[in-house]
Image (cartoon, rainbow, N blue to C red):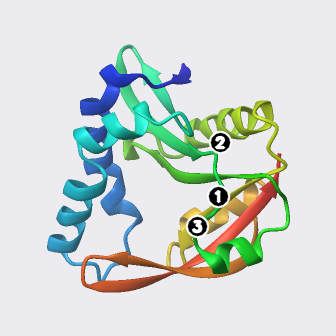
Amino acid sequence: MIREANTSDAAALAELAAVTFPLACPPQSSPEDIAAHLANTLSAASFAGYLADPDITVMVIDIDGGLRGYSMLVARPAQDPGVSAALTLLPSVELSKCYVHPEHHGQGAAAELMEASVAHARAGDAAGVWLGVNSQNARAIRFYEKSGFRKVGTKTFRLGGSVEHDFVMERAV
């Protein structure tokens, strides 16, 4: 079942992020940088803050009380000037995170989560959804293209001491 997360999900979201985030990182990412990102951005306290923010919605795949995937939608204008310049569908919602536990890869769970995320953005009167994906993450890029996203620009993402290069992708809702 896909549902909106609530504050009681914060710890489970952090546990899921600890499994899924490293899978999206480029191979050269250091374990220390990944651990720091998890601690600073994807901790239970961080998720509690996201869940309390009225501009952020976290959708979860909940199977028998266990979280198996999540997405995070941010309904405010892009802060990065390069992203803002690349977007063509406004107002736009950022799909900040979209991860599924590896045990559920290849079973359609990610497509269902994406469909629910786009439907949520549409219900909020967005014209488009955008995301940043690491330029080396071929599997994710294929999934996003299959989900209707197209590359519209680039941006950088700092992971600890390294600067990663992301594609900015966008789709209509």
Under circle 1, the secondary element is helix
Q: Which residue is mark 1?
A: 143
Q: How packed is label 3: few (under 14 Cα within 10 Å), some, or many (20 or more)?
A: few
Q: Which residue is mark 3?
A: 79
Residue 36: x and y, percent?
Answer: 19, 65
Under circle 3, the secondary element is loop
> Looking at the rendering, in which quadrant would you find the C terminus?
top right
**The label number, if any, that marks residue 36 in the structure image:** none
Q: Are marks 1 and 3 in contact (CB under 8 Å)?
A: no
Position of 95 relative to 136 (above/below): above
**The label number, if any, that marks residue 114 in the structure image:** 2
Under circle 2, the secondary element is helix
Amino acid bearing label 3: Gln
Amino acid bearing label 2: Met
Q: Earlier in the sequence, mark 1 or mark 2?
A: 2
> Looking at the rendering, in which quadrant would you find the N terminus?
top right
Which residue is found at the position 82% from the left and 37% from the top? 125
Q: CA distance from mark 1 to mark 3?
A: 25 Å
Q: Are marks 2 and 3 in contact (CB under 8 Å)?
A: no
Mark 1 or 3, which is nearer the eye? 3
Q: Are marks 1 and 2 in contact (CB under 8 Å)?
A: yes
The foreground one among 117 and 65 is 117
Q: Earlier in the sequence, mark 1 or mark 3?
A: 3
Mark 2 or 3, which is nearer the eye? 3
Residue 141: x and y, percent?
Answer: 62, 67
Which residue is found at the position 24% from the left and 67% from the top? 34
Q: Earlier in the sequence, mark 2 or mark 3?
A: 3
Position of 27 relative to 53 (above/below): below
